[in-house]
Amino acid sequence: MKSLLRFLSVGSVGFLVDAGVLLVAMMLGAGPYAGRAVSIGIAAVTTWRLNRRYTFAASGLSEIEEGARYFSGVALGSGLNYTIYALLIGADLHPIGSLIVASGLVMAFSYAFYRFVVFAGFKPN
């Protein structure tokens, strides 16, 4: 339960990074699709570092191998997240509203993947 609460806290930080970068990108002229492509990548790096430090602890793998595993989960989760986001944008939901819904729907998948694949066998912090 402790790791889930920490994951949700890290996810909240990641969400704020994602939303903040998306808003800045859109203010600088990027559309909601291109802006989200940038923001989701920056948020992924942020959450990897925070999850590694506060949620799951280092996996015992090299940072390169752990990063590769983490970002395979990011690719799967982000692909699903971005697809839901794009569908909601297409349905005329505001970009931030679309971000909230998509992120919320993908959260359980992400936690399970990181906990049981990336950081499998290592005691949560």
Image: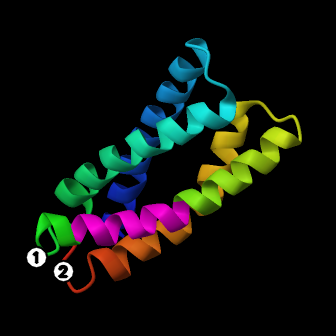
Residue pictured at 54% horizontal, 68% vertical: 108
Inspect the image, locate mark 2, and give the three-letter code of the amino acid beneath it.
Answer: Phe
Q: Tell me, yes or no, if residue 114 can be seen here.
A: yes
Quadrant showing the N terminus: bottom left
Residue pictured at 53% horizontal, 63% vertical: 77
Label whose residue precedes the other's in the sequence (2 or 1)? 1
- SS for callout 2: loop
Closer-to-camera residue (36/48): 36
Residue pictured at 42% horizontal, 33% vertical: 17
Distance CA(mark 2)–CA(mark 1): 8 Å
Q: Over which residues does the magenta segment extend?
A: 66-77
- The x, y position of residue 115, in whole percent, is 35, 75
Q: Tell me if residue 99 comes above or below residue 63 in the rendering.
A: above
Residues marked 2 and 1 touching at CB (< 8 Å):
yes
Which residue is labeled 2 in the image? 122
Q: Tell me if residue 10 comes above or below residue 75 in the rendering.
A: above
Which residue is labeled 1 in the image? 60
Inspect the image, locate mark 1, and give the three-letter code of the amino acid beneath it.
Answer: Gly
